[in-house]
Structure formats: structure tokens, C-alpha cells
Image: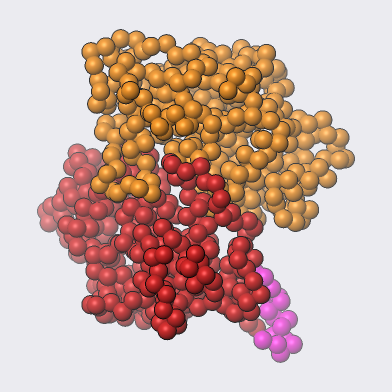
Chain colours: A red, B orange
């Protein structure tokens, strides 16, 4: 349908070669966490005394993830809880150190700077984050003013009148009445709190804004206003967005491109419209089918049964989706599908050609 | 359509006494659910959806007071019945699933024990058989390896599995009415679909009426036979799902639909709803609580709203509805 099939190009892992240097370039990023609880310190000691290996099992939270975000682009990141979205975001925002791979922001390699040191780095302000529920992510003892001023003070060294002026400008940009700046989070409505969360992130003028479900806690009527605000700010301030969400309806509205993640790996990526209109990966299909829509009672949907596979030391030869996938065959159990190019998008499924041809 | 109603709520009003004044949280709330059907109550936060459910279940906060109304479950008025009478039907005849299953379950008892408790208390299952029946119920709600899972504590299970346990508990005594308060908020869309399918299938099997409270209009569109739209403690519209989306008549319903993201819409085309909920402590609340936000306001809107019966085809609480 929309995908053009060309088997000769269907081999490489990387995204489209960008015309200009992308703002963010992520290559083969990995993050693993040791799970020590499974054998315990005594078990480790016993193994060591026997002379055996003391290899700890690891959770493969982010595994071989590569993508780019262009200047002024909005990229959506979707997937179930536990798929590694949050870990990926924490590595990108340099709150965590990656286990391997490269994170490049505007040409500068960030992954070599340890997370602790990056907190004081002059480039810290270039990546900012808007957290899920501003009611819970803003210090309850900070007024709206203090919450917005904090990053400006720490990252830009602003003080006194300059600080006040900058905070007020950020509030104006985000449609937060100045009279509310003296209030504490609990004295603000959900929409006003969301504006505070956005204002504190954009006040330092980042290049990349990472938004983690910014409207999940809001009612639909307020959600629309906040999404329109984000759209306007992006144009005014020339930012790029990484928009993390599991609400496909919202992702469809504001994202240019979308990354679909499953158990630590990207299974499909491409222009949001194409991906949602005609998903090529069975997991994307299931996600699209599961999202309720006003005009469809959802007959003939793919239903995912069961729980995802364990992310602890997964077999590198088995497709991560095997077991829940309606298409699963023996090949999926013996050969992990690589991310392959299909026209304007990438898909990691052995049956993508078949799906696209239908 | 003319099925016997399993639950009829009529003219329900609830107030909360607070230090800063009396909050008139619900007024003249009426609706009915026939056996085997699903009714969705939709509205934004603060619209009174959950208070309605709590009032019917008799679990309102002590500050809340039911000032009028009836809730007929079969022949029993839940609002006028004694505490003992309500306790006798709650869990047996009418059950509830809460938002956020992890906080609704007891963290220091295994899920098997918690299901067994309900079976002993509400389903007349002998003490010795209860653990075995609990495992069967876990299997019925689609938990793999139920015998092992019965020994797990809530923290050892995913959100979707905890919600399945909640469903097993709620349905243990095969109630005739189930109230599900935002049962899938916080779950993934894929899990949401499975949980909603599960509730639907089980409801069909035992002919149960389901009241399903949600802020997600799209989810209600997909799952409910009939939808009640609430705004600031009033029912503003009550119609079959097909009718409500084909011909919304209350201006608020139309605006809610226009604000909901959908496949066809673009961000620019989505409309926000101007204004906000009125302060329900105000003494001068207008008869129509939407009037101050309403684009279709007329002079008539200051008069008392048209009376709304409980079992209607299409109820609109508006003097100037869309046609």
C-alpha cells in the first residue's frame, strides 16, 4: 500500500540519511541493569569459591536503539509500560549512563560525559524534560515562580531582576497568568500545573524538549489547549520534541515521526501517518487496534494475550515479540528479525513484506 | 430496549459539608441500567461520576450527605436501606471495581487469600473449599498458572494482573450489577483492551448490568450501549451510544466530542472547551451549571431545567439543544 518494497535496501539498521546533521543522533544505544537479587550475595560467593563465573543476569532495558531527531521535528515514542521508554528517555536526558552506544546532540558526543558531571555541563540546558504529572514532579514547597526560576538559576546563573524578568517571560509564553506565580502547586488546576512544568523546561531555551506523557493527567478539554500550546512553542522557540506517550490519538496529532518500542528494541519507525494508517509490525498493529476510537466499535481487532517475555538476559536469537505475536513461526524463534528499511520506514519483522503486500 | 432495569437511580443529590461551604456535588441525577447492558458515565474530573458510584454503593466520605433520591436494586432502595441491609447486598448483588487496583488490594495478603475471603463472606462457599475456588476464579479471569499466582502478593503482579484479581473479587458472588470506576486508567492500551473484553465477556455470561465510569469518550463509544454525560454534578445528556455520537444534543456533549482526539482530526480542528467547572460551593449557582460556559445560552437558561425522567430514550437537560 503506502510502503514501496525494495529488497536491496532492506538490509541496514539505520534511519534515513538526513539531509542536514540531525539535532539528536542516537546509535546502537544500550542500557542494561544487573539483577543481583536472583542469586544473592551468598550465591555469588559460593560461585566464586567454586571458581565459576560471577556473571550477573541483566535486564536489557534498552537494546541496540538507533534513531535521529531533526531540527524542529516532533518524534513520538510509543510502547507499553516496561518496554524501556522511560529508560531510553533517562539515558537521552543524561540522567543515566548508557551501557553502550552513542548519543550525539548537535554534533557533540554526550554519552562519554558521566551523568553526574553532565549536571554541571554547559550543554545541560540544551536538553530539558517535561514530566508526566506536574502536580507530582514539581516540588510542593516551591511556588510556581520558584519552580520556573530553579533551572534558570542553576543552568543560566540568572539572579535578581534578570531572573524575575525571564521567569515572567516564560510564564507569558506558556499562558500562565503572572498572578499565579506566587501560588504553590496544590493551589493550581491541572492545566495550570502543566503550564508551570512546560514553562520551567522552556525557560532555559533548550534545543530538545523531552515530553513524558505531558497530558496524561489532564481532561480532554484541557489536553487540547496544552497540545496547541506545545505546537505554538515549538514554532516560536525552534525546539525539537521527543514525545513519549501511550495515547496513540495524541501522538497521531502532534508527531511527524513515530518510534514503536517493544521490550527494549525499536520494532517499527517512520512517518506517524503511514505507521498508524498501515502498521507493518504486528505489535504496532495490535497497539493501533487496541486504541479506542469514537467511530469504530473495533470489530476484527488483533488482541494481544499474555504478558511480554522476560527482559532478563533475553535470547538474542528469538524475536522479542515471539509468544504474543499472532504470526509467530519457528523462524521467529531462531532468528531475531533486524530492523529493515521499507520505503520511508523501518520494520523489524520477518513478515513485513507479506503484511505490506496485503 | 425494554429490558428489566437492574438498577434505577432517581433524583440523586449529594452534598459535602466543608469548612469553606457546602459543595452541592450532585443534583437530580437519574439513570437506569437494564440487565445485561453496559452504561457508561462520562465526564471530566469533578463532574461527579465517582461520587455517584460511591453514593450508590454506600461508601461516601463521612463529609458527604445524600439529600434526596432513590437507588433501586431490585426491590431494595439502597439509599434508604439500613446499614445491615446494604452490607447484605454489597459484594453479592452489587460490586465495584476501583481505579488503581494496586491500592485497592490488601498489600499484605496474597491475592488467593483475598479472593477466598470474598467467597466465604459473600458467596456462601465453605471455608475449606474457598482456596480452591479462588484458583478457579483466577483462571476464569485469564491468569496463567493460577495456582502459583494465588500465592503471590499484589506487588509481585503487573497492573493488568492486579486488575484481573480485582475483577475476580468483584465477580466472585456473580453480582447483578457491577460498577467499574475507571477500571483501565493507568493501564496500557493493549492491556486496557483485554481487561475491557474480559469485563464484557463475564458480564454477558452472568447477565450482569455494568456501569462503567470513564473520562475517555472514545472508550465509552466502543464499549457502552448507553452513555450518560455528566457536567458539574448534573446529568446533561443520556442517550444510546449510537444516537449520542450521531446526534449529540447538549452543547457540552458536542464540545466534548469535538475535543477528543480521533483518527480523522487535526490538532487545529480540535476545539477546547472554554471556561471551567463552576465552583459548586457558590450559593448563586445557576439552574443550568453549564450556562456560564455555554455558547448557545438564551434568556430561558436562567429558568429551572426541564425535568428528566430515569428511563427515557434520549434525555437532554437543556433549553436550547442542538437539533
Segment tinted magenta in the rendering: A30-53
For the point 31% across and 62% down, the residue is: A256
Q: Position of residue A295 (x, y in %)?
A: 43, 42
Q: Could you tell me which residue is drawn at 38 percent across and 28 percent down? A: B248
Q: Residue at x 43, y 51 (%)?
A: A247
Q: Which quadrant of the figure has residue A5?
A: bottom left
Quadrant (top left/top right/bottom left/bottom right) for the N terminus of chain A = bottom left
Residue A127 within the magenta-colored segment of the rendering: no
Residue drawn at x 28%, y 39% as measured from the top left: B271
Q: Position of residue A357 (x, y in %)?
A: 48, 68
Q: Magenta segment: does it hold A40?
A: yes
Which of the two residues, B323 or B285, is positioned nearer the viewer here?
B323
Q: In the figure, is residue A232 to the left or right of A67?
A: left
Residue B41 pos. (x, y %): 49, 30
Q: Relative to the observer, which residue lies in front, A117 or B257?
A: B257
- Quick check: B138 left or right of B197? right
Residue B258 position (above or below residue A170) = above
| B321 over A140 or under it: above or below | above
Using the rendered view, name the quadrant where residue A113 is placed: bottom left
Q: How many marks?
A: 0
Name the residue at the bottom extreme.
A51
Q: Is residue A354 visible?
A: yes
Q: Closer to the camera, A276 or B21?
A: A276
Q: Nearer the viewer, residue B51 or A316?
A: A316
Residue B21 drawn at (x, y percent): 37, 19
Is residue A145 visible from the viewing direction of this image?
Answer: no
Amino acid at each position: 500500500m503506502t510502503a514501496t518494497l525494495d529488497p536491496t535496501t532492506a538490509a541496514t539498521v539505520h534511519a534515513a540519511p538526513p539531509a542536514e546533521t540531525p539535532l539528536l543522533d542516537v546509535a546502537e544505544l544500550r542500557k542494561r541493569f544487573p539483577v543481583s537479587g536472583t542469586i544473592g550475595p551468598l550465591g555469588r560467593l559460593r560461585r566464586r569459591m567454586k571458581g565459576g563465573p560471577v556473571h550477573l543476569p541483566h535486564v536489557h532495558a534498552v537494546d541496540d536503539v538507533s534513531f535521529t531527531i531533526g531540527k524542529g521535528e516532533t518524534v513520538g515514542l510509543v510502547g507499553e509500560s516496561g518496554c524501556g521508554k522511560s529508560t531510553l528517555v533517562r539515558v537521552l536526558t543524561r540522567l543515566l549512563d548508557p551501557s553502550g552506544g552513542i548519543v550525539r546532540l548537535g554534533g557533540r558526543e554526550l554519552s562519554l560525559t558521566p551523568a553526574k558531571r553532565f549536571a554541571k555541563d554547559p550543554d545541560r540546558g540544551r536538553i530539558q524534560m517535561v514530566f508526566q504529572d506536574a502536580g507530582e514532579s514539581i516540588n510542593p514547597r516551591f511556588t510556581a515562580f520558584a519552580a520556573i526560576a530553579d533551572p534558570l538559576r542553576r543552568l543560566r546563573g540568572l539572579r535578581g531582576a534578570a531572573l524575575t524578568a525571564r521567569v515572567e517571560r516564560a510564564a507569558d509564553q506558556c499562558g500562565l497568568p503572572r498572578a499565579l506565580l506566587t501560588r504553590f502547586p496544590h493551589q493550581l488546576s491541572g492545566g495550570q500545573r502543566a503550564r508551570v512544568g512546560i514553562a520551567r523546561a522552556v525557560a532555559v531555551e533548550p534545543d530538545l524538549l523531552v515530553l513524558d506523557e505531558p497530558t496524561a493527567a489532564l481532561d480532554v478539554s484541557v489536553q487540547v489547549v496544552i497540545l496547541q500550546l506545545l505546537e505554538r512553542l515549538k514554532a516560536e522557540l525552534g525546539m525539537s520534541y521527543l514525545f513519549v506517550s501511550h495515547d496513540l490519538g495524541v501522538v497521531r496529532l502532534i508527531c511527524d515521526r513515530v518510534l514503536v518500542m517493544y521490550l527494549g528494541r525499536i520494532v517499527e519507525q517512520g512517518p506517524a501517518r503511514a505507521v498508524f494508517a498501515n502498521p507493518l509490525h504486528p505489535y504496532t498493529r495490535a497497539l493501533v487496534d487496541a486504541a479506542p476510537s469514537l467511530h469504530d466499535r473495533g470489530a476484527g481487532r488483533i488482541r494481544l494475550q499474555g504478558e511480554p517475555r522476560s527482559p532478563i538476559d533475553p535470547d538474542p536469537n528469538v524475536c522479542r515479540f515471539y509468544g504474543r505475536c499472532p504470526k509467530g513461526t519457528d523462524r521467529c524463534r531462531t532468528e531475531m528479525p533486524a530492523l529493515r528499511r521499507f520505503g520511508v520506514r523501518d520494520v523489524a519483522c520477518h513478515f513485513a513484506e507479506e503484511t505490506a503486500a496485503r | 430496549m425494554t429490558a428489566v432495569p437492574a438498577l434505577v437511580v432517581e433524583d440523586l443529590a449529594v452534598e459535602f459539608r466543608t469548612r469553606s461551604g457546602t459543595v452541592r456535588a450532585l443534583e437530580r441525577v437519574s439513570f437506569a441500567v437494564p440487565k445485561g447492558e453496559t452504561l457508561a458515565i462520562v465526564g471530566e474530573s469533578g463532574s461527579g461520576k465517582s461520587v455517584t458510584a460511591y453514593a450508590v454503593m454506600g461508601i461516601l466520605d463521612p463529609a458527604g450527605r445524600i439529600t434526596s433520591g432513590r437507588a433501586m436494586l431490585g426491590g431494595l432502595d439502597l439509599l434508604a436501606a439500613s446499614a445491615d441491609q446494604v452490607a447484605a447486598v454489597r459484594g453479592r448483588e452489587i460490586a465495584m471495581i476501583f481505579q488503581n487496583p494496586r491500592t485497592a488490594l490488601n498489600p499484605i495478603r496474597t491475592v488467593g487469600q483475598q479472593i477466598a475471603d470474598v467467597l466465604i463472606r459473600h458467596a456462601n462457599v465453605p471455608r475449606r473449599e474457598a482456596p480452591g475456588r479462588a484458583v478457579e476464579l483466577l483462571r476464569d479471569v485469564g491468569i496463567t498458572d493460577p495456582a502459583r499466582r494465588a500465592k503471590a502478593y499484589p506487588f509481585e503482579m503487573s497492573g493488568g494482573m492486579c486488575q484481573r484479581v480485582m475483577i475476580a473479587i468483584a465477580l466472585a458472588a456473580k453480582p447483578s450489577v457491577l460498577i467499574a470506576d475507571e477500571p483501565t486508567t493507568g493501564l496500557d492500551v493493549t492491556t486496557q483492551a483485554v481487561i475491557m473484553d474480559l469485563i464484557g465477556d463475564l458480564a454477558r455470561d452472568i447477565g450482569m448490568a455494568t456501569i462503567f465510569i470513564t473520562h475517555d469518550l472514545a472508550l465509552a463509544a466502543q464499549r457502552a450501549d448507553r452513555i450518560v454525560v455528566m457536567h458539574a454534578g448534573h446529568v446533561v445528556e443520556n442517550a444510546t451510544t449510537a444516537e449520542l455520537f450521531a446526534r449529540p444534543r447538549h452543547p457540552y456533549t458536542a464540545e466534548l466530542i469535538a475535543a477528543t482526539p480521533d483518527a480523522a482530526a487535526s490538532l487545529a480542528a480540535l476545539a477546547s472547551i472554554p471556561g471551567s467547572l463552576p465552583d459548586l460551593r457558590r450559593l448563586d449557582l445557576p439552574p443550568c451549571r453549564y450556562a456560564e460556559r455555554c455558547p448557545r445560552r438564551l434568556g430561558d437558561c436562567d429558568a429551572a431545567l426541564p425535568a428528566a425522567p430515569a428511563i427515557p430514550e434520549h434525555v437532554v437537560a437543556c433549553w436550547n439543544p442542538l437539533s
